[in-house]
Amino acid sequence: MSKDAVSWPPKLVRPMRSRAVFLLAFTAFFLVSAGWALALPANGTNDEDEHIVRAYGAASGQLYSAPAAAARGGGAWYDVPRSLLPVNADCTYRWELPASCLQRPPDDPSRTEVGTAAGRYNPLYYVPVGLPMVLSPNMAGIILGRLVSAAMVAGLLAASATIAVRRRSPLLLAAVIVAATPNMLNLAGSINPSGLELAAGVLTWTALLTLVRARAGELSDRWTSQLLLAAGIGAATLVSIRTLGPLLLGLTVLACMAVARPGRTRELRQRRDFRAVGIGVAIAGLLGVAWSLFSGVLNNPPAETTPRHLSFVEKIAYILGDRLTQWVAQVVGRFSYGEVQAPNGLLVAWYALALLIIVPTLLFATWRQSAAILGIAAVSVALLVGFEVLYYQHIGWAQQSRYILPFGVGALLYAGCLRRWEHRFGEVATKRFVLLCASGAGLMHLWALAVVMTRFQVDQREKALGALHGTWLPAVGPQIPLLTTALGGLLLVVLVVLSRAPKPGAAPAIAVALDAIVPGRRQPRVARPSARIGSVPERSSD
């Protein structure tokens, strides 16, 4: 074996089989998202009623509808059952009322023409989430569609976690867990393509960074092929769902090429499977662009109320003084139509976990690596500012940080990919920090859900948590969503614990318990003494 082949930390992650890692991670992310799916009323997230109409239309065969002034001056018309949505689906945010204001839809499956602002969006996401609504055009179908959405997002995030564990990079695993913010999993558990778009960005970054940062001998030929396939799935999803996808993927690829090891991109380009994946992503991108041009989705209707004229300096001043703080909150926890924000303590704690990954890496990394991390963050902010200034006079202040986050999350994931943190603080500190990230994330997911449930069940102005009572309650009761999310958070901790290397000679009791319920799990190998007395595996910096 070459010198470089043993240069990454070999003891930080237990050699669990990929199937066991994927199963645990998938279940964890799915359960956290499912808690949101079960807890929210109809139209409980941003524009969900618009996406529900689009999803039913796409799944019932109405893949395309001619552009029309159907909703907010744009969108399209679709035939949907009267029983699908309450007639006053916007009462909760329009009048800041609990969900008890929603009128029960009539038990009438006959169709009526309904306009939706999402009517011109690519149907790729909407077909699978809309199928349950076709079978059951009521709230039960909506919840099942949300669970389908949660499963798709959980699959992409679980693939990212599997890559991190298989790469034996605990800090990258922590970065994936922190990247899956309450806002992302709230969107995952609703009818909204943004959750899938964000998860696709996480998978694309994780797979590409693992490919381009690999040392000689670190990746087997089979695993390289699997990573290329994972990157291809993430990239094809990203370029297909939303109009900004091709731009975000292009920036991601350029950033990964900039941080690649010398000669690594050339080595990858010579592989046949690299070319096959590239062709597949290119076809998906072309189809996505063709849909955007053909459907009229790029023709944004003007704002209902014409924004007042502002000079360039006034726009920048307002963005720096107000919009920037909103974007920061949106990344972690700004829910419903923006009227519900996670508590400041939650926002600070979540950003603290992210900064504890990024800041030490910036301090200990080379100037090129630090420049790449800061550059990704700077380009993300610049894009948001640019789009806000460009489109303000037409649609007002409408940009949200999640529009750019599939690219911006790369700053966190690249910091987690580098091994500066692990090398500087050591194995014990790394284990403890990753466990802190998992346990803290699990608790904060539950906290955020309880806050939003209180808003819909009691009142938006209620300061104390009241997730167990109210004038409106979820169809399954308030306990099941909370327990579901709590169990998902607990499984995140279990994933981290089981992926940690055991102490020498320690009996892996919890691993033995997992073997009874997870097929195909592999017991950790017993470390053999080195043939050379006093020899120590080399660990060079990343």
Image (spheres, rainbow, N blue to C red):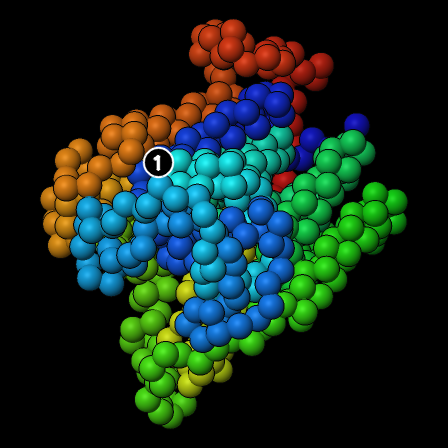
Amino acid type, callout 1: Leu
Q: What is the total number of numbered labels drawn onto the structure image?
A: 1
On-image quarter of the C terminus: top right
Q: Is residue 298 above or below residue 267?
A: below
Relative depth, front residue between 160 and 185: 185
* Circle 1 SS class: helix
On-image quarter of the N terminus: top right
Answer left or right for 9 relative to 449: right
- Mark 1 surroundings: few (<14), some (14-19) or many (≥20) residues within 10 A: many
Q: Tell me where residue 7 appears, x and y as whole percent.
A: 67, 35
Answer left or right for 172 relative to 343: right
| Residue 177 seen in the figure | no
Q: Tell me where residue 528 appears, x and y as whole percent.
A: 65, 12
Relative depth, front residue between 68 and 288: 68
Q: Tell me where residue 421 appears, x and y as whole percent.
A: 49, 43
Relative depth, front residue between 17 and 147: 147
Q: Is residue 506 above or below residue 341?
A: above
Residue position marked by numbered label 1 in the rendering: 38
| Residue 97 seen in the figure | yes
Q: Residue at x 59, y 32 (%)?
A: 162
Q: Tell me where residue 182 appears, x and y as whole percent.
A: 37, 45
Relative depth, front residue between 385 and 131: 131
